Image: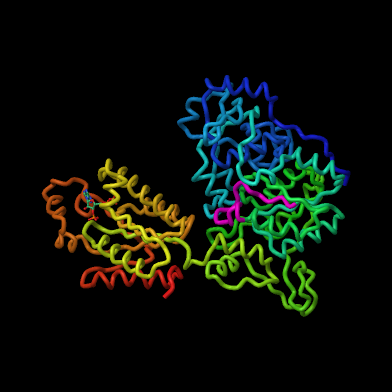
Amino acid sequence: MSLPNLAPIRELYVSYDSAQKLKHEAGDLPSWDLSPRQICDLELLMTGGFYPLKGFLTEADYDGVVDGMRTASGALWPIPVTLDVSEKFAAGIEPGQDIALRDQEGVILAILSVTDKWVPDKVREAERVFGANDLAHPGVNYLHHVAGPVYLGGPVTGIQPPVHYDFKARRDTPNELRAYFRKLGWRKVVAFQTRNPLHRAHQELTFRAAREAQANLLIHPVVGMTKPGDVDHFTRVRCYEAVLDKYPASTTTMSLLNLAMRMAGPREALWHGLIRRNHGCTHFIVGRDHAGPGKNSHGRDFYGPYEAQELFKTHEAEIGIEMLDFKHMVYVQEKAQYFPSNEVPDGGTVLDISGTELRRRLREGLEIPDWFSFPEVVAELRRTSPPRSKQGFTVFFTGLSGSGKSTIANALMVKLMEMGGRPVTLLDGDVVRKHLSSELGFSKEHRDINIRRIGYVASEITKNGGIAICAPIAPYAATRRAVREMVEASGAFIEVHVATSVEECERRDRKGLYKLAREGKIKEFTGISDPYEVPENPELRVETENAEVDNCAHQVILKLEQMGLIRA
Ligand code: PPS
């Protein structure tokens, strides 16, 4: 392989003066507020990280990339980098027009000269790019549920890079890294891509790779978007910083890459290789299950464990970066050392801790052995993921009016406060309607807004380590699911169906509302003239007929204990 070309790579930025002028003129242009993923893509387009792309893919480029991993001009490019927008926005845009691309605060980052506008066939995109139209794949899920329905393509004129307030000194453009390698005389550089904290197995892998290639090492973690559920990048970067001094400073450096991963396995490995070549690297590590998305909806892997290595091999020369392929690294107890799984000495006892097992140990506050990771890394992870009994959670009661939700919720609150340790907030239906949703009525639309507000507040409480107890009617399953998703991003969600029948609620009629509903004096009354979708799989269902309130609240306590959220 020839020595690296460390000359500057083409960026898409214009000069400072032109940028000022464009910014001024862009006031009159239609504006698109970029999504977090589009900001990541735009940054790498503008810095040359996505060289040779000059903008968001045109329709012809897109077709070529989706079908055969090549742009219309024949360049190897495995992942569609497209600007997806809403139908409403697209309706006002025609090819030939310029649009201003803005960050979420409205700062203009670039101009897109639109040459193409089209409605993609997302099923085809999913099947070709990700190998299956299966929503269990995070990339497919994003494509169908987050990305807009219309794509715009065309060249990008860069005005300014997206602003980052975190780890500024650790972020480098391709040209900054190229200049750094040039300055230090690094002729050969191995890049290590990662979206996980570095444990001992990774360190051994990177040492071996650098030794094998007789090269310097670039630890190049992704801090843009990774797989949902991954350790957040703030924690990871603190972990990387903690292990960096275990590498010889004169041979190793670390830089953060603001890439939005797609988890596309083999195709993604090629993409990562192209991006690292653009950053001035000569070698690239591809391990087991590179950029793997996890299991499909049938519980099977989307890609073979070494499929990424195979695909990379066939395109290695064209990418212009040499692959260092590695088998899964495992610890051999007798040798007190890591080995690739195919080089384990005969009779050696192999130890390994999977990602799932590591998360379980963190969640339950269990031991993480020294052979697996570094004490500094484990301490950092424990700081971010305290055991479940110290994390926040949300108990979400749902049931008809008068079913007993508020009474049980109150009893639960008092019991949890008696235990102490975490602040408890009760978001009761009536109270929320007074303080958060006073302008709302009981149409489906208004009920959904009401429940989403409760969900938002509950997720914030959960994120900050508190206990939120919610007690609205919440009659619609889809809205309850949306709240669950919001909360589960930061902690546990326990749905409790208070399963009092409508007949019993009406018999009790504590507030006299059922009578008014029967008389038609209250419209859209849940259970009488409005639907209630019974939860299919709540964490708990409590019957209130012939049961004491205290006992109902106690059932919730037992459930929380069983889930490890409170200690007996
Ligand atoms: S929802 O659907 O979840 O937004 O409803 P929620 O905010 O929990 O409702 C709170 C209380 O409003 C009273 N109320 C009605 N309920 C249902 N349907 C109609 N049309 C209605 N109008 C007023 C009712 O007393 C609810 O209190 P709870 O605590 O559930 O008895």
Measuring 21% from the left and 72% from the top, which residue is drawn there? 546
Q: Position of residue 426 (x, y in %)?
A: 33, 58
Q: Is residue 233 magenta?
A: yes
Measuring 60% from the left and 27% from the top, which residue is drawn there? 111
Q: Is residue 129 visible?
A: no
Q: Which residues are magenta?
A: 219-235
Between 152 and 11, the one lying in front of the other is: 11
Which image quarter is the C terminus in? bottom left
Q: Is residue 24 above or below residue 526?
A: above
226 relative position to 528: left or right: right
548 relative position to 457: left or right: left
Measuring 85% from the left and 59% from the top, which residue is drawn there? 211
Between 31 and 118, the one lying in front of the other is: 31
Q: Could you say which quadrant of the image residue 209 lies in?
A: bottom right
Measuring 66% from the left and 63% from the top, which residue is drawn there? 376
Q: Position of residue 163 (x, y in %)?
A: 61, 37
Q: Is residue 1 magenta?
A: no
Q: Main secondary structure of the magenta part?
A: loop
Q: Is residue 337 above or below residue 34?
A: below
Q: Position of residue 465 (x, y in %)?
A: 46, 59
